[in-house]
Amino acid sequence: MADGNGKRASWSGSVAFVLAAAASAIGLGNLWRFPYLAARYGGGVFIAVYLALSLTLGFTLLVTEIAVGRYSRQSQLTAFRALGHPRWNFLGALSTVVPLFILPYYNVIGGWVVKYFVAYIRLVCGGGGLEDAQGFFDSFIAAPWDPFVCMAVFTLVSCAVIVMGVKNGIERANFVMMPILLVMAVGLAVYVALLPGSGEGIRYYLVPDFSSCDNIGKVILGAMGQMFYSLSLAMGIMITYGSYMRRCDSVPKASVRIVAADTFVAVLSGFMIIPVVVMFAAKSGAGRAAIDAGPGLMFVTLPKVFASLGAAGAWIGFIFFVLVLFAAFTSAISMTEACVAAVCDFFRIGRNASVAAICAWTLALGSVSAFGYGRWAAFKPCGMPALDFFDTSMNVLTPVVAALICVFVGWVLQPKRILAECQRDGSAVGFKVFYVVMVKFVAPILVLAILASEICRIFGVGGWRI
Ligand code: PHE
């Protein structure tokens, strides 16, 4: 997409690119979903499987998307046409639909984080309001306007960053937020490790517990689905971000760094969350249910845990929600950019007009999810709240898109085109055979396995439930 003067925008360097892609990848998936899946699926077993998968499958898919973007110099919507395969351009349309539908409800959850961030500011300043964590959450999401207003604030601020452009907006926001996020995450993990009694929780997190992963297939599928979401794959984001990458930078090196940064923060989040939840579970008698709280972990269990930490709890909660806010915000920015760039490239309109269109779309569709627990609670597509409905549909669509991208690159475009793009900066590529085998055979099969498991989950076929 042109950045004002008609030339395609670009990152100022490889650090800026890696930071932007890592900022997209590091989000709610790392801070909330990874720790809770690790706790559920045998601690160290899950972590080991996750590491192995992200370094192989995750790396392959990431290299593919970034190289497609850089080669075509187009966002996902028009990239496939630019590669000389107009018949496959439906894939661009599909991978534009994904962020267009995820962004609105992701911003609703972003709005929830804004609400908690404000609640903890109040708490730190001596106010109250969070004594009954469950009641706070239930009455907030069912309130007539609150969830919409919080979502709108989150959306408008992220659109403001996008209006400022790739270098002046996205890059600058990442340069401020990502280092703060990292320092806070390391600080919290160290604080938790020093708490008396945290050893048991750390053991619970790290030591492989084979008894709680009776079915290794489930662990692998769980880890794979998580890796997918966590690396922001199959949403056009990495194609769009790759299209702003300079030709002199190395795609494989950047990909390894993005995978490493994303995995580091995911593992670190486990150190931050699991020991305190385990300690809380023992103290309050909540047992395993506290750890297995799923979506409620972040908005109900953790506030209870923070409250149990005494005077320090308000500050810990505040720091934690700043961290979550930054992580969610930089991820939302990347999704907004993928949508905005697609609209610009397709309709050949200016950036501001495109941002306005995406902002209006997000507020309109987001309102369905925002009001879905309150004033519009009666509207239940397929029997679920609107937010769950969108989430479930997207969980099916993303593996479809990813599998099709692998089939396209592996069998139609040919892997050598991607490998040639990887060599453009002049560096040798030592993983050619690995890449070809992965993209032609292993990746499509594994990705289709996630799809099958997701469909089984939706239809309640118990054995493969994740
Ligand atoms: N990768 C982000 C995370 O780990 C989530 C995300 C999904 C971001 C889709 C952008 C697009 O939370």
Image (cartoon, rainbow, N blue to C red):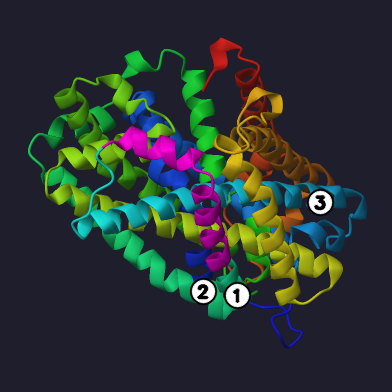
Seen at 52% across and 60% down, the residue is: 154
- Tell me which residue sits at (64%, 40%) in the image: 438
**Label 2 element class:** helix
Q: Is residue 74 left or right of residue 213?
A: right
Q: Is residue 246 above or below residue 57?
A: below
Residue highlighted by disc 1: 166
Closer to the chain start, of discs 3 and 1, is 3
> How far is mark 3 from mark 1, CA to CA?
22 Å
Q: Magenta residues?
A: 132-158
Residue occupying image coordinates x 64% and y 18%: 456
Residue 175 place in picture, x, y as percent: 43, 73
Residue 394 image position (x, y, % from top left): 66, 38
Q: Name which quarter of the figure residue 300 lies in.
A: top left
Q: Which residue is mark 3?
A: 93
Label 3 environment density (alpha carbons within 10 Å; few <14, some 14–19, many ≥20): some
Q: Quadrant of residue 446?
A: top right
Cβ–Cβ under 8 Å for marks 1 and 2: yes
Mark 1–mark 2 Cα distance, whole angstroms, equals: 6 Å
- Residue type highlighted by circle 3: Ala
* Residue holding disc 2: 171
Instruction: Check the picture and name the quadrant holding the N terminus.
Output: bottom right
